[in-house]
Amino acid sequence: MTYSEQDNAESPAEGDSSGFDARGAAALLEESTRRAQRQFDATPPFLLLIGAVIFFAGYGAAWWSVRGQVPYVGPSGGALAVMYGGIIAWIVAVVTVVQRATSGVRGRSSKSRKYRGGYVIIIIAYSIFQGALYHAGASHTIVYGIFPTSAPWLFAGTVFVTLGAVHEEARSLLLGAVVIAIGLVSAFAGPITAWLVSGIGLCAVLIGLAILQSARRRA
Amino acid sequence: MPFEEFDPLIHVPARLRIMATLATLLEGDTLSFTRLQELTDLTPGNLITHIRKLEDAGYIEIDKSGSGASSLTTVALTSRGRQALGDYSTSLRKLLDGV
């Protein structure tokens, strides 16, 4: 840390309480708190809303490409490119925002956010398991329909429920239960409708989280 | 409530901004000097002057690690500092509610 000597003096405006009334102090306290909360926020509402649009568009594209398929063969390459391309771009944006939010922060808050990168393990495990299903001779309906629209949400929901139980966080527990419900509804919806259910469900969850986050910021 | 009853160490714009910023972190978390400077819009000289006063009062802890270009200075709010900011905030609310 270096700083110039001429800086090493309190400026009258910043270091003096004369003329600093209670109303001004309350406003400054609130403004500073809100600003810091926004800067440290790793999941800002705009990022959640972008995610909502991406999941809706990606899964919508997959659903559009499988509509009326008899027999079911799965989404087209173009639809999968739109879906996975969007999701990867969103993950990159999330990682960038998390790094920015935790920059300079050390301790529990930054550690817990950084360890969320462990979700990548879930994505890898899910992909390998999908390959195993294909290798075992499971039908396209399962490998390219039911599994990709339900298994990720069952995995992710289980993680949220576990985290909620461990940290006694009702919000995480509820989020996990909703995500698991989306996975189960998708599984029962059949390989074609499952893509639409997943897209709408995840879009709704992310919009709900964005609204909650905005409300928390205003509180 | 007269102004004299406000904690004079906190009732200063720069120090109030520093305390409020550090209070948004979880208890025990630290913030680098550079990030704190960015969030409070203070010059390095002003910031170091104010955080030293807060450190003398036991409201914050300053930790320096490493040396030279790789040195890192981190700042954290102490339990005492968190309590003092809470008391200050309560005093402010009482005064404003009474107006």
Image: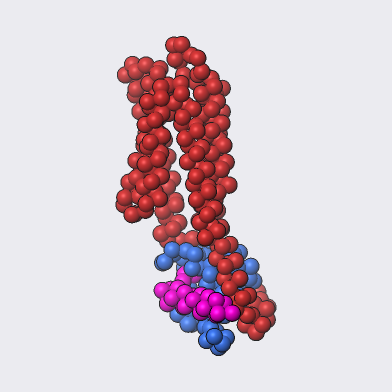
Chain colours: A red, B blue
First to last magenta residue range: B75-99
Quarter the N terminus of chain B occupies: bottom right
On-image quarter of the C terminus of chain B = bottom right
The x and y percentages for residue A129 are 35, 28
Image mark count: 0
Q: Is residue B62 above or below residue A208?
A: below
Q: Is residue B65 left or right of residue B16?
A: left
Q: Left or right of A95: which side holds A170? A: left
Q: Is residue B85 above or below residue A37?
A: below
What residue is rendered at 63% in x and 67% in y? Answer: B41
The residue under the point 50% across, 39% down is: A204
Q: Is residue B37 shown in magenta?
A: no
Rendered location of residue B40, percent (x, y): 60, 68
User: Please, which residue is most extreme toward the front here?
Assistant: B98
Can you see residue B28?
A: yes
* Residue depicted at 54% across the width and 30% down the height: A58
Residue placed most toward the observer, A13 or A4: A13
Majority secondary structure in the magenta region: helix
Image quadrant of residue A5? bottom right
- Pinpoint residue A192: horizontal percent, then vertical percent: 46, 21
* Residue with the most extreme top position: A70
> Is residue B34 in view from this perspective?
no
Query: Residue A184, relative to residue B62: is it above or below?
Result: above
Task: Report whether A62 appears left or right of A173.
Answer: right
Q: Which residue appears at 46% of the width and 29% of the height?
A: A197
Is B94 in the magenta? yes
Whole-percent x, y for residue A44 in the image: 54, 50
- Residue A206 is left or right of residue A125, and the answer is right
